[in-house]
Image (tube, rainbow, N blue to C red):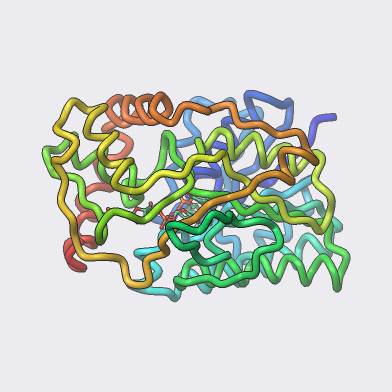
Amino acid sequence: MTRHLLVTGGAGFIGSGFVHHVLEHTDDTVTVLDKLTYAGDKTSLEGLPDSRVTLVEGDVADPAVVDELVSAADAVVHYAAESHNDNSLRDPSPFLQTNLIGTFTLLEAARRHGTRLHHISTDEVYGDLELDDPGRFTEATPYNPSSPYSATKAGSDMLVRAWVRSFGVQATISNCSNNYGPRQHVEKFIPRQITNLMLGVRPRLYGSGANVRDWIHVDDHSSAVLRVLDAGRIGETYLIGADGEKSNRQVVELILQLMGRDPQDYDLVADRPGHDLRYAIDASRLRTELGWEPAYRDFEAGLAATIDWYREHEGWWRHQKDVTEAKYAASGQ
Ligand code: NAD
Ligand code: TDX
């Protein structure tokens, strides 16, 4: 059965990846609702057929726009968010507006129209783990967010759970680990270092570089979300991860090596305030209950392909770079 999906934030990194994935793997049609903030880019949807994808420029916190689009959709996948921790430390206010009020606005529309909703969230809601802790996050880990960004994502998850329980909204939640791949904004760690190197600037590691992130290719995130949308139990949360733990130092050294440079050729800069030490996902529920498996198992190959994408798409990222670096320079990073 073909569906009509409403994808919020579908002009951003992961949302646009999901739209590409849906077009390739289903017969569904898609409406993207995106405010086209600094992080959204229409060209991330270029090349997709107009007959199957429509972009509506609008705010997920605008009840009139959201009501109309939700009423016309069979299901909603909610990616729209302010997504960058460093920005949330400079100015938290848009994070509260989009991540909390935006999610509330969608939930109210889903409640009115009885529409299925899948909410996209992050492993950062669980706070962090010690570097030597043998444990990983599971669906039972208590929430303990550290940054304004992760606190608003945690709050949005709580709103979804409350709307499921109190109003019977047909929602699921997924909390994914760090994504990498094409079309990620150059403010984020991996694209920042790749594009720095392309411009002759040394990579910049926060603190000691010992912090660990659990990397997953964006296309694997998309396949997992589609699986939860199709087969997830209403009211449940699913953790998404692909066993990709690496220290930031390891990632930078690999980028340098893949780009033909000395792996030690990077700088240590001011640490992020409140910097989470380590994230690690146990995705057993998703794997055993829904039979999901990641397709990208070789991080080095995925990273090499991502480097190639930035080399081939300088026109996509070049205009974002100077304004992004000016913000970092102001905080010594
Ligand atoms: P992104 O910043 O690249 O994209 C966000 C998109 O949302 C942009 O297109 C932006 O224009 C749009 N947007 C922002 N405010 C809006 C508003 N008020 N109304 C409508 N659209 C708005 O972010 P991303 O990295 O693609 O993350 C997408 C989602 O995935 C977020 O919910 C994020 O919390 C979650 N997530 C991200 C990661 C990661 O590694 N990047 C990991 C887990 C979960
Ligand atoms: O220049 C840098 N140097 C550096 O060492 C930057 C930009 C980051 N870092 C470090 C900070 C983190 O330990 O690299 C790691 C990754 O940083 P980000 O790309 O900013 O990601 P993170 O803060 O881990 O959050 C990401 O994953 C979870 C996404 O941005 C979130 O949206 C998602 O919820």
Residue under the image location 60 percent in, 57 percent down = 137
Left or right of 244 on screen, residue 247: left
Position of 86 relative to 8 (above/below): below
The quadrant of the picture occupied by the N terminus is: top right
302 and 315: which is toward the camera: 302
Residue at the location (52% across, 43% down)?
14
Residue 249 vs residue 163, the one in the foreground: 249
The quadrant of the image that shows the C terminus is: bottom left
Image point (83%, 62%), residue name? 169
Asked whether the viewer can see residue 81, the reply is yes
Where does residue 7 sit, x and y in percent of width and height? Answer: 64, 46
Q: Where does residue 54 sit, x and y in percent of width and height?
A: 61, 38
- Is residue 63 visible in this depiction of the protein? no
Where, by quadrant of the figure, is residue 252 drawn?
A: top left
x, y percent for residue 192: 28, 46
How many numbered callouts? 0
In this picture, residue 42 sits left or right of residue 144: left
Please provide percent x and percent y for residue 219.
55, 33
Viewer-nearest residue: 35 or 252: 252
Task: State the residue at coordinates (66%, 45%).
Answer: 283
Q: Is residue 30 left or right of residue 291?
A: left
Name the image quarter holding residue 153: bottom right
